[in-house]
Amino acid sequence: MIAKKRFVYCHHPTVFYKSSWYDWKFDYKIGVFSILYKYLFQINIKKNNAIFVQQEWIKTEFEKLYNINNIIVCQPEYTEEITTDKIALNSHKVHFLYPSFPRTFKNFELLFDAIQLLDDEIKNKVQFHFTTIKDNPHKYAKYLFEKYGTMPEVDFKGWISRKDVLKLYNSVNCIVFPSKLETWGLPLSEAKAFGKPILAANLPYAKETVGDYEKVSFFDVNNPTELAQLITDFVNKTIKFQGNKYTFDTKNQLNDWNAIFDFIFKK
């Protein structure tokens, strides 16, 4: 049986990622996906009535890559969830949080390199918190813990509850997000919900997710010196946030699953 109408939801952005030996070493699937997805996506892609993607920048890249014009942006549903509760942190420190699962494209090393570039005076004033790394059997997580776990500025946490993650958001001073690849970048939305200052990757996904927001600055994902300077400026309270404005045509954008199914049934 051949379907009269076809739709595909392209969620994985690895097609736009250039893997390195580092990715192959710690998670070969990332390398495989970065090579194969470009070709897997193009199989019968032009036979679809519509292709759904999560962000405008992905839509633009798909249009260029596959020469198609029936792509619909469907932003992921995000329900704002905050708390007034906090966890006890050293009040004499400035606290930064990178909430992420340890994958190589998450670019943890950039942040560790930036920390090591900080002046001793700044190092004594900061604490960086990372989730899901401690006691994680994943190969890359074990590598990070063994290599960086003794740094006095680093606090590696294990798996913590959603409730405690929200408390951590509410307790820290700044969110850092250096990831090289995301379909959305949920921690950026969560940081905004808490009104936290953000230091984020200077990439299209981050700017689109952050949207209109004043307390954000962006850095080159390959430049630890630039990030170290932003951290220093933040600690010294001399930072001048770049801010972000992101606007695009939303007339054909869908914003939840109900809207997607309504579109499919009416097509």
Image (cartoon, rainbow, N blue to C red):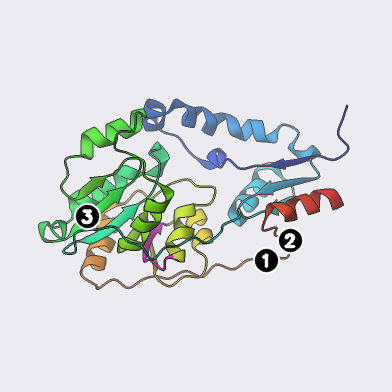
Task: Identify the disc placed on residue 159.
Answer: none
User: Which residue matches tag 2?
Assistant: 252
User: Which residue matches tag 1?
Assistant: 249
Say which of marks 2 and 3 sits in front.
3
| Amino acid type for the residue under numbered disc 2 | Asn
Q: Secondary structure at mark 1?
A: loop
Residue at figure coordinates x 16%, y 40% from the top left: 150
User: Residue 267, can we see it?
Assistant: no
Q: Do the residues under discs 3 and 1 have CB atoms within 8 angstroms? A: no
- Residue 140 image position (x, y, % from top left): 34, 32
User: Which residue matches tag 3?
Assistant: 127
Q: Earlier in the sequence, mark 2 or mark 3?
A: 3
Q: Is residue 205 placed above or below 43 in the rendered structure? A: below
| Amino acid type for the residue under numbered disc 3 | Gln
Give the extent of the magenta segment: 194-201
Q: CA distance from mark 1 to mark 2?
A: 8 Å
| Amino acid type for the residue under numbered disc 1 | Asp
Q: Do the residues under discs 1 and 2 have CB atoms within 8 angstroms? A: yes
Q: CA distance from mark 3 to mark 1?
A: 40 Å
* Viewer-closest of 80 and 69: 80
